Amino acid sequence: MTVEVELYARNMELSENLKEYVTKKASKLDRYLSEVEHVRVDLTHIKSARSATDRNVAQITVRGRGALLRVEERGDDITAAIDTAIDKMQRQLDRYKGKHSRGRGDGRSASEVAPVPTPVETTDEEVPVIARHKTFDLIPMNEGEALEQMKLLGHDNFFIFFNVDTNSISVLYHRRDGTYGLIEPKIG
């Protein structure tokens, strides 16, 4: 199985050696979890960082069937940041593999349990401008898996997921007192 590796750089030039180095390291991540299909590596150089050890940032995002994991590492050398991020991702993949068995258990596909969207009525009033539209795949999971996924991705405020227990979209959020809340919308 070949892993698709995307490489992006901001505020830095990518040499061919660095491209080959990153691609070689990232393409081996499927050894740790066979479900890995896509790896995105973002490399950034931040000139205005307070510390020299925070100037080079390597962020790795791994996608696969049911898996979405992200790590970020900083260093004074970009290859050191890449190596540390790869090691961290390997540990996350091992931990993810040990904790999860895929499947909803009832044999239904996600398209069968997903609700049908209803059209929204529009008026002639002035509508605020929506600056960005974002789409993402909802992976069916329960509340415990959503909490773990939220922590693994580093999402501090909220996480949207398809709740298999209620067959609806739910929002998990972090409360000020350190606990978590769950929003379960209902069509009125």
Image (cartoon, rainbow, N blue to C red):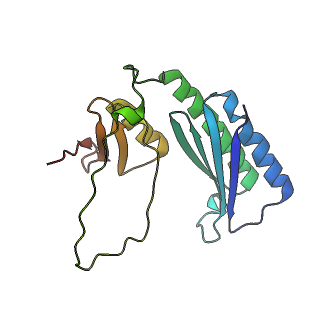
Numbered marks: total:
0
Q: Residue at x 42, y 49 (%)?
A: 155
Q: Where, by quadrant of the figure, is residue 7 drawn?
A: bottom right
Q: Is residue 84 left or right of residue 63?
A: right
Q: Position of residue 56 (x, y in %)?
A: 67, 59
Q: Position of residue 161 (x, y in %)?
A: 37, 41
Q: Where, by quadrant of the figure, is residue 53 drawn?
A: bottom right
| Residue placed most toward the observer, 15 or 4 | 4
Q: Residue at x 28, y 29 (%)?
A: 165
Q: Looking at the picture, does residue 35 appear above or below residue 98?
A: below
- Looking at the image, the residue that sits furthest to the left is 188
Q: Position of residue 140 (x, y in %)?
A: 40, 34
Q: Is residue 16 left or right of residue 85?
A: right
Position of the N terminus by quadrant: top right
Q: Residue at x 30, y 41 (%)?
A: 115
Q: Residue at x 18, y 47 (%)?
A: 187
| Residue placed most toward the observer, 122 or 56 | 122
Q: Is residue 47 left or right of residue 167?
A: right
Q: Is residue 9 left or right of residue 137?
A: right
| Residue placed most toward the observer, 42 or 124 | 124
Q: Position of residue 118 (x, y in %)?
A: 27, 52
